[in-house]
């Protein structure tokens, strides 16, 4: 009864979901707990950022929702229906664009619809619509190797949006890009999200990125992952990166997230970490917290 009541009011629901993996290290086989049982609800049209130290299960959470993995316990619901596998209503965008190099930009964007047998005329209209949305209309006939990294990622986003998913899942999609390109794509994604109203779950290590984009930020604990806190970002969209309010809010979150990053470092480095772990130098909080651990 509780599950039915919860599912009625939420777009996405993680209900006591957990996940473990078998790790084979030659002579030793062991079970590694990736996620402890966790619950989370996401409303339609929300932009959720998931942040935490490496290995805490952020990507696993997206893979479970995408249907690429199955939970050990619990259920994942989208519009009250249990996720049992991949579906076109849930599209995953990775760090690498994954474009097919022999296809033009337009053919990459339309590929999903071509597989589904959608008529060529309709595919053409969709390609025009979504390439215009990511400001790449003039590159429709271009091959991927002729594009910059940021442009390739725009094509990847257009390809995902062309399928008109209910939920867009993004796994550190901008982390391999330079800071200037990342800033441009932050603005693009914010605009696209407001235009389409798509529900977005976005994994990142970057606190300022999360504060700039998200309605709510899910802070994960060190592995095995669970939800430490869910923080509402109290600023209206669109936001300005130069805002002192955003900087102050990022600094508050930095301390909470760093506690979990320190746990990972202490576990991996032991006494060496404790001896070298001095108070941090005050400064910008836009760095990727935990990305290198």
Image (cartoon, grey):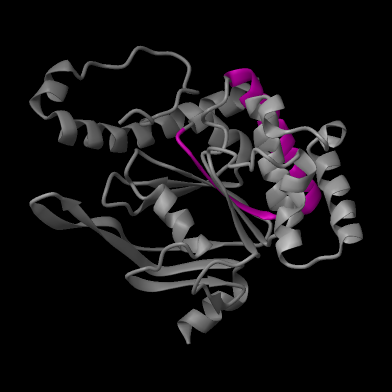
**184 magenta-colored:** yes
**170 magenta-colored:** no
State the residue at coordinates (71%, 63%). Answer: 115
Q: Quadrant of residue 288?
A: top left
Outermost residue toward the bottom in this view? 1
Q: Would residue 9 appear left or right of 161 to someone viewing this image?
A: left
Classify the position of the C terminus by image quarter.
top left
Main secondary structure found in the magenta portion: helix
Q: Position of residue 62 (x, y in %)?
A: 48, 55
Compared with 153, 278 (above or below) is: above
Compared with 95, 248 (above or below) is: above
Query: What residue span does the magenta drawing correspond to?
Result: 179-205
Residue 141 visible in this rendered orientation of the protein: yes
State the residue at coordinates (68%, 44%). Answer: 157
State the residue at coordinates (70%, 58%). Answer: 112
Residue toward you, 93 or 11:
93
Q: Count the marks.
A: 0
Residue toward you, 6 or 103:
103
Q: Position of residue 235 (x, y in %)?
A: 65, 38
Q: Quadrant of residue 268?
A: top left
Residue toward you, 130 or 51:
130
Q: Position of residue 257 (x, y in %)?
A: 37, 36
Compared with 83, 132 (above or below) is: above
Outermost residue toward the front in this view? 102
Q: Would residue 260 appear left or right of 211 to someone viewing this image?
A: left
Q: Quadrant of residue 267?
A: top left
Compared with 74, 178 (above or below) is: above
Q: Position of residue 37 (x, y in %)?
A: 32, 64
State the residue at coordinates (83%, 49%). Answer: 127
Residue 164 visible in this rendered orientation of the protein: no
């Amino acid at each position: 009864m509780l599950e039915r009541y919860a599912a009625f009011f939420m777009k996405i629901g993680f209900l006591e979901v957990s996940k473990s993996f078998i790790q084979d290290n030659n002579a030793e086989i062991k079970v590694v707990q990736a996620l402890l049982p966790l619950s989370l609800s996401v409303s339609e049209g929300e932009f959720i950022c998931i942040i935490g130290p490496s290995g805490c299960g952020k990507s696993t959470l997206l893979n479970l929702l995408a249907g690429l993995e199955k939970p050990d316990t619990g259920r994942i619901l989208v519009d009250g229906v249990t996720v049992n596998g991949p579906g076109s209503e849930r599209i995953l965008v990775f760090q690498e664009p994954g474009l097919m190099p022999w296809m033009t930009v337009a053919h990459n964007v339309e590929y999903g619809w071509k597989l589904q047998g959608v008529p060529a005329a309709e595919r053409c209209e969709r390609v025009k619509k979504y390439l215009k949305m990511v400001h790449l209309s003039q590159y429709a006939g271009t091959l991927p190797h002729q594009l910059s990294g940021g442009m390739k990622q725009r094509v990847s986003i257009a390809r995902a949006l062309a399928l008109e998913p209910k939920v867009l899942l993004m796994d550190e999609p901008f982390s391999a890009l330079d800071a200037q390109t990342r800033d441009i794509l932050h603005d693009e994604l914010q605009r696209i999200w407001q235009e389409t109203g798509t529900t977005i779950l976005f994994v990142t290590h970057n606190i300022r990125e999360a504060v700039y984009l998200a309605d709510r930020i899910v802070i994960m604990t060190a592995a095995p992952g669970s939800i430490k806190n869910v923080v509402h970002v109290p600023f209206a969209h669109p936001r300005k990166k130069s805002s002192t309010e955003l900087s102050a809010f990022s600094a508050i979150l930095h301390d909470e997230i760093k506690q979990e990053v320190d746990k990972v470092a202490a576990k991996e480095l032991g006494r060496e970490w404790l001896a070298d772990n001095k108070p941090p130098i005050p400064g910008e909080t836009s760095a990727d917290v935990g990305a290198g651990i």
